[in-house]
Amino acid sequence: MARGCLQGVKFLMFAFNLLFWLGGCGILGVGIWLAATQGNFATLSSSFPSLSAANLLIVTGTFVMAIGFVGCIGAIKENKCLLLTFFVTLLLVFLLEATVTTLFFTCTDKIDRYAQRDLKKGLHLYGTPGNVGLTNAWSIIQTDFRCCGVSNYTDWFEVYNATRVPDSCCLEFSEGCGLHAPGTWWKAPCYETVKMWLQENLLAVGIFGLCTALVQILGLTFAMTMYCQVVKADTYCA
């Protein structure tokens, strides 16, 4: 009876981790594709130049693949050490995510101030050699969100030391339109505009976060259940 229960949990554990591993492969693939085609797209921070969408996806995908691989091998081999390693690693990730989420909501004002200050520093790297990713990211954000600058279009005046903005700030794009009068530029601040967009889509973000948490809890449950079944089976054999 115990052996049959172990085999059932083993199958579920293997299937779960196989999907987990395949998900990691998908994330890694998207990250590599972004790195190859878009460079360092979405690198807006001057303090963390490596914090790009591509790099985050590559690191996340690799990590998820590694955890899924350990879980799969642990399930196939019925190895207590690997099962426990999988459980502890996934538990630490879950606790880290919970801590980061809590800090984010309790320190929103401090995060806002730091983020705006860092983004304004990053504006000075716009259009400079070696910062194609940052330049592309700002151009896309300003065009798609119809905004200009971090807190105001005048943020760009300090960058250029002149009354001008990037062409992506223009109501109607044309070469050199950033040299025209302010009446031809977007007036909305990009930071607040993007923040409002995120707040409007908070439900979708919340559902994604909840699904992620449920998947992790399911993985923890499978791992601990199988670990206990393996220990019980070893006890019966002894």
Image (cartoon, rainbow, N blue to C red):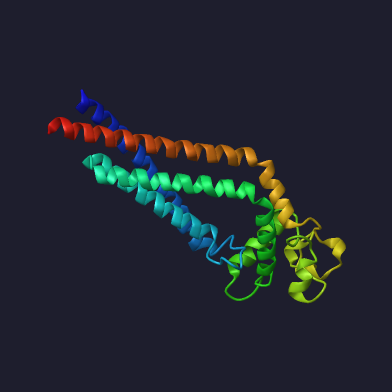
Foreground residue among 71 and 145: 71
Relative to 160, is 195 above or below? above
Q: Taking 35 as reference, is 233 left or right?
A: left
Q: Taking 203 as reference, is 2 left or right?
A: left
Residue 39 in the image, given as x and y percentages of width and height:
53, 64
Residue 45 in the image, given as x and y percentages of width and height:
61, 64
Q: In terms of image quadrants, where is residue 23?
A: top left
Residue 56 in the image, given as x and y percentages of width and height:
50, 57
The reply to whether residue 223 is in sight is yes
Q: In terms of image quadrants, where is residue 18?
A: top left
Position of the C terminus, as image quadrant, is: top left
Relative to 116, is 176 above or below? below
Position of the N terminus, as image quadrant, is: top left
Q: Residue at x 70, y 59 (%)?
A: 113
Q: Residue at x 64, y 51 (%)?
A: 107
Q: How many numbered tags mark residues here? A: 0
Q: Residue furthest top?
A: 1
The reply to whether residue 23 is in sight is no
Foreground residue among 122 and 88: 88
Q: In terms of image quadrants, where is residue 200?
A: top right
Q: Residue at x 52, y 61 (%)?
A: 37
Relative to 208, is 66 above or below? below
Residue 140 in the image, given as x and y percentages of width and height:
66, 59
Relative to 121, is 59 above or below? above
Q: Residue at x 74, y 67 (%)?
A: 166
